[in-house]
Image: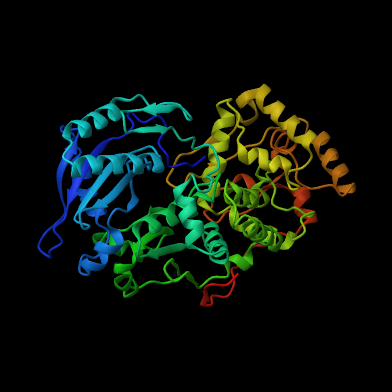
């Protein structure tokens, strides 16, 4: 479903690197020690040291106070667009960084192991250091929930990334929720849904990368599809001028340099001051009832532990996108139907939504089907249709496997555009069925098996896609078009606003 996480990596981690940086103007970060010793990825060996010190060393005393002992995570993207995580721990007056490079998003596990490895290094316990790394590197990747013992001092349980993140177990979400108030979380969420260019700045590296990772995780079951750099090193500051959407973290020691660049229409969240600057009205453009419900839920769980925060965002995603199975854009029964219609018109252009749809169709074409916490949530929501209808749809999917979408062809070009054809069976019968539903003033959201599997080409009207390629949600039966005028979101007037400690 558009996830950037690599499936079935070869090992628990790719490399362990100790990087030193004297901090003088003429010096550069260098790899002092590595494991395995025969690790030969020269691109990584040249790139990782720069990401290990993503701040200005000019104010060294400040950095020594704020950065020592901190854990943070950068991300490298491989040739297949999969994320390689660089889990880091700063030590020794911010002059040494311990880094584990891995495809596994085990934040808490690797942070714990880095602390142990740093302790072994400081105490010169070379045998323990090597034993831990060898055991970890040779360990077959366990299933989620399995306890792992790597030695006397190293024990962990394999995290289950399929579960919703919870507080305080999930470090990223915990730091994000503590550092940023509810109002700014809502604005940032809206900006990500509209795929803006987003900068997050903070003076504390651990909080900075936690806010980037934590905020992106709230898009589940979708995933940020554009430039994603949780912490930006100095040599890549020009990325902030990129014309495409991005989600980038910048250390506060570099933010003045960034602000001196030509930044147009960029959303900026300053975590230190808890203020957000945006030229857009994205939050106001979302359906008001969805925003109000999300805000209310977040305030209710503000003093509690567990998955309440993540579940609040999941409910909002279900309210906004839960109708995707129906293949239509208009939901006249929605309490805020005009705003919802406008949002969905914009949604069909979002890369995160296109990738999500492509992922779901891949599962259907393969005959696997799908069942996850998002599907469970939309089944319980008022926007999903009747439970009986949904189970009929699921039964058809499971029974027919990929047969329903045998005519679907997915082209894996950079934008992941999808072209859909429709079956020709039982058209007249289905038209009468749809008319009957309209007369009863029931929801216009028609099940995939009612429309996609039984709509003739004569019924289909292809609305013009912004990229001149059809999308599943733009194939609306002529009958629907005659009853509902299509509304396109034109975008609000751009105005500069500042949101601070407001609730």
- Quarter of the image where one finds residue 361: top right
Q: Residue 23, position in %: x, y? A: 15, 61
| Residue 316 vertical placement versus 373 (above, below) | below
Q: Residue at x 24, y 46 (%)?
A: 98
Q: Nearer the viewer, residue 457 or 54?
A: 54
- Counting every numbered tag in the picture gives 0
Q: Is residue 178 left or right of residue 129?
A: right
Q: Report the quarter where the C terminus lies.
A: bottom right
Q: Is residue 34 left or right of residue 195?
A: left
| Residue 86 vertical placement versus 104 (above, below) | below
Q: Nearer the viewer, residue 112 or 28?
A: 112
Q: Is residue 268 left or right of residue 430?
A: left
Q: Residue at x 55, y 54 (%)?
A: 349
Q: Is residue 488 left or right of residue 206?
A: right
| Residue 40 vertical placement versus 287 (above, below) | above
Q: Residue at x 54, y 59 (%)?
A: 189
Q: Nearer the viewer, residue 386 or 342?
A: 386
Q: Nearer the viewer, residue 46 or 396?
A: 46
Q: Residue 296, position in %: x, y? A: 67, 60
Name, please, the residue furthest toward the left. 26
- Quarter of the image where one finds residue 249: bottom left
Q: Residue 1, position in %: x, y? A: 52, 39
Name, please, the residue furthest toward the top. 399
Q: Residue 298, position in %: x, y? A: 62, 57
Name, please, the residue furthest toward the right. 440
Q: What colouring style does the render use?
A: rainbow
């Amino acid at each position: 479903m558009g996830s950037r996480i690599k499936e079935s990596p070869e090992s628990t981690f790719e490399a362990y690197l100790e990087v030193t940086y004297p901090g003088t103007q003429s010096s550069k970060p260098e790899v002092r020690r590595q494991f395995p010793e025969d690790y030969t990825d020269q691109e990584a060996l040249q790139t990782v040291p720069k990401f290990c010190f993503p701040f200005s060393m000019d104010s060294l005393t400040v950095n020594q106070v704020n950065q020592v002992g901190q854990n943070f995570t950068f991300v490298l993207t491989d040739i297949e667009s999969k994320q390689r995580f660089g889990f880091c721990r700063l030590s020794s007056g911010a002059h040494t960084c311990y880094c584990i490079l891995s495809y596994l998003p085990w934040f808490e596990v690797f942070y714990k192991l880095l602390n142990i490895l740093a302790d072994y290094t400081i105490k010169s316990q070379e045998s323990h250091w090597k034993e831990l790394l060898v055991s970890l590197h040779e360990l077959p990747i366990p299933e989620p929930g399995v306890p792992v013992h790597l030695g006397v001092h190293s024990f962990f349980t394999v995290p289950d990334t399929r579960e919703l993140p919870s507080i305080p177990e999930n470090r990223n979400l915990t730091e994000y929720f503590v550092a940023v108030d509810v109002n700014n979380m809502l604005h940032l969420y809206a900006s990500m849904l509209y795929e803006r260019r987003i900068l997050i700045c903070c003076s504390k590296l651990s909080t900075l990368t936690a806010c980037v990772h934590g905020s992106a995780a709230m898009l589940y079951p979708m995933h940020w599809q554009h430039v994603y750099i949780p912490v930006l090193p100095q040599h890549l500051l020009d990325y902030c001028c990129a014309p495409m959407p991005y989600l980038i973290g910048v250390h506060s020691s570099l933010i003045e340099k960034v602000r001196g660049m030509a930044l147009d229409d960029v959303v900026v969240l300053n975590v230190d001051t808890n203020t957000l600057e945006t030229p857009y009205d994205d939050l106001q453009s979302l359906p008001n009832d969805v925003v109000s419900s999300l805000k209310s839920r977040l305030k209710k769980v503000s003093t509690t532990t567990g998955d309440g925060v993540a579940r609040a965002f999941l409910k909002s995603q279900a309210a906004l996108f839960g109708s995707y199975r129906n293949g239509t854009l208009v939901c006249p029964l929605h309490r805020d139907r005009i705003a919802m219609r406008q949002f969905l018109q914009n949604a069909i252009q979002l890369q995160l939504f296109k990738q999500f749809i492509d992922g779901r169709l891949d599962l259907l074409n393969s005959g696997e089907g799908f069942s996850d916490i998002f599907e469970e949530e939309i089944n319980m929501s008022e926007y999903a249709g009747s439970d009986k209808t949904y189970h009929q749809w699921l039964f058809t999917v499971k029974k027919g496997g990929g047969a329903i979408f045998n005519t679907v062809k997915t082209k894996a070009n950079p934008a992941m555009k999808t072209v859909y054809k429709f079956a020709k069976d039982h058209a007249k019968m289905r038209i009468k069925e749809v008319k009957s539903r309209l007369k009863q003033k029931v929801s216009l959201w028609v099940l995939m098996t009612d429309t996609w599997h039984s709509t003739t080409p004569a019924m289909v009207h292809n609305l013009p896609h912004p990229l001149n390629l059809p999308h599943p949600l733009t194939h609306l039966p002529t009958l629907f078009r005659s009853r509902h005028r299509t509304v396109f979101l034109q975008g609000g007037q751009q105005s500069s606003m500042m949101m601070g400690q407001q609730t």
